Image: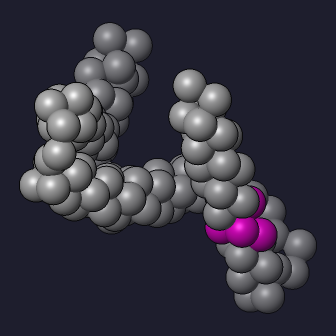
Amino acid sequence: MIHKKRIIGFSLVIVGFFVFLSFSFTVQKANAVLPGVDLDIMGVQRMIIGIACWSINTILAVMVIALIVAGIRFYIGGAAGNVASAKKNFLWVLVGILVILATNVIIATIAYFLGATYQAFTC
């Protein structure tokens, strides 16, 4: 249990670091082109869409790696407990991939219930 908490904590630190870097590069690029940028709502929307696209692509890459590792663990097998653990891991990685791929549907559903208009973003 402690090992899982460390992995989750480390993952959150890494994701936070990359989000911070993406913000800093966006600000540096914007300042290089237009000093004293006046940020409007469309600029904020473009930044959020950029972060969402980057996050989705990064998480999908990590999930594919996790799927490969789960498949290798299942293939190697060993004791019955290891095979059951590998099956469980494989299942939850697939669930995670489906959730990430369904983010546009989830956001559109929430927007519909809130009465907002929503256009799906393309990465």
**Considering only vertical position in the picture, is 75 above or below 87?**
below
Classify residue 24 by image quadrant. bottom right
Q: Residue at x 35, y 20 (%)?
A: 110
Q: Quadrant of the C terminus?
A: bottom left
The foreground one among 97 and 113 is 97
> Is 57 positioned to the left or the right of 108 in the image?
right
The foreground one among 23 and 1 is 1
Q: Quadrant of the N terminus?
A: top right
Residue 5 in view, yes or no: yes
Q: State which region is magenta.
A: 20-24
**Considering only vertical position in the picture, is 115 above or below 42?**
above
The residue most toward the front is 79
Residue 7 image offset from top left, x and y in percent: 58, 44
The foreground one among 123 and 59 is 59
The foreground one among 85 and 67 is 85
Q: Is residue 22 magenta?
A: yes
**Considering only vertical position in the picture, is 103 above or below 44?**
above
Classify residue 34 by image quadrant. bottom right
Q: Main secondary structure of the magenta part?
A: helix
> Is 14 positioned to the left or the right of 94 in the image?
right
